[in-house]
Image: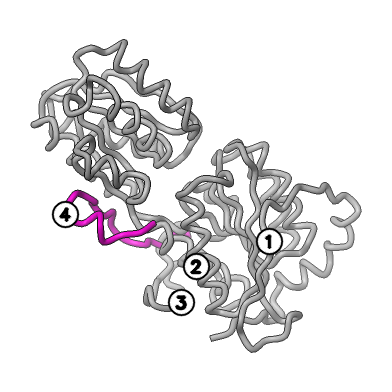
Amino acid sequence: MSITKSFTKRTLAVLAVSGTLALSACGGDSGGSADSGSGSGSSEEQVSVTMLPKNLGNPYFDTSTQGARAAAQQVGAEFEEVGPQEATPDAQVQYINTAAQQGRDALILSANDPSAVCDALDQARSAGTAIVTFDSDTEPECRDLFINQATAEGIASAQVELIAEQIDGDGQIAILSASANATNQNTWIDLMREQIESDYPDIELVDVVYGNDDDQESFDKTAALLQSNPDLEGIVSPTTVGIAAAARYLSDSQFDGEVALTGLGTPNQMREYVEGGTVEAFALWNPEDLGALATYAATALASGEIEGAEGDSFSAGELGEFTVDADSTVLLGDPFVFDAENIGDFDF
């Protein structure tokens, strides 16, 4: 299957404004390289896709980019990954501007803030760039589609059920999150609070701290949590950087085997801690599939195959057929629980 551009209004917009935007180009380092797809279309016909994760050097996003690149090759789209080293909204803006100035057909973004990048995204959309968010959404009016890894309710519930099982439904817990402005983490935390209050009255959420998706900061916040809360029974970390840093701290401390840890992580990061007994179980979706689905959706949108309206459907290769839901969202599926019994079956 090869994805080529139809002469849509997006294409017209690119032709109309690309010259103007080029005059105000601000150069951001690409931080990645462009790949050409293997489809049959000429380079002029190829849909061009830019992927902008929260930051580079994050194993979670490395895996989602791997899936995105493979999907781009599958549909014959030209693909590049760019991004900042630090997970901040300001750092993402220059890459959004550059994508618009270069007339990229689609931008796939995991937003570091739901609203701070909206002005830049509005400009990119005006230039004809289709905006597809994944992992962490913007305000809905700032993008064309959001590829949802799982429902917020499903992700929150999976983490509550895991920690409740591991502490027998009784005791103090804390949350080690990413940044205080991360849309997805904050939504999950709010839902976790609600479920704990309704279903587990003997569990007390005593603190929420933020490691800003920085390994050392998350490690230090874990140590501080345990020092300031001596009766803590468990920690929930809904971020792959945070849970790995917390597991590393626990595994080399007197709290190993005494304080439960769960949340969202990748098998390769968590394998030694699961096999070593520090972590009993954690959850996640497959970020490789998430990146692939975002790319299939972005190319379908940019080529005019879909408009992003509720009820639109498109093929995502081996992932199957997907339909656009309300609020221009596409759902990948339910979270998956990894434990000692199955972690050896995965490599990402």
Report the disc number at residue 59: none
**Of callouts 4 and 3, which one flags the residue occurring earlier in the amino acid sequence?**
3
The stretch drawn in magenta includes residue 346? yes
Left or right side of 12 for 108: left
Q: Quadrant of residue 310?
A: bottom left
**Of callouts 2 and 3, which one flags the residue occurring earlier in the amino acid sequence?**
2
Say if 193 sits above or below 58 in the image.
Answer: above
Residue wearing tag 3? 314
**Of callouts 1 and 4, which one flags the residue occurring earlier in the amino acid sequence?**
1
Q: Residues within 10 Å of mark 2 (few under 14, many from 20)?
A: some
Say which of marks 4 and 3 sits in front: 4
Which residues are the magenta region?
328-348
The stretch drawn in magenta includes residue 124? no
**Of callouts 2 and 1, which one flags the residue occurring earlier in the amino acid sequence?**
1
Gap in angstroms between the C-alphas marked 4 and 2: 41 Å
Residue wearing tag 4? 341
Give coordinates of residue 252: x percent, y percent.
30, 26
Residue under the point 65% across and 62% down: 80
Residue under the point 40% across and 31% down: 177
Give coordinates of residue 316: x percent, y percent.
44, 75
Residue wearing tag 1? 33
Which coloring applies here?
one colour
Say which of marks 2 and 3 sits in front: 3
Say which of marks 2 and 1 sits in front: 1
Gap in angstroms between the C-alphas marked 2 and 1: 32 Å
Secondary element at tag 3: strand
Give coordinates of residue 254: x percent, y percent.
23, 19
Secondary element at tag 1: loop
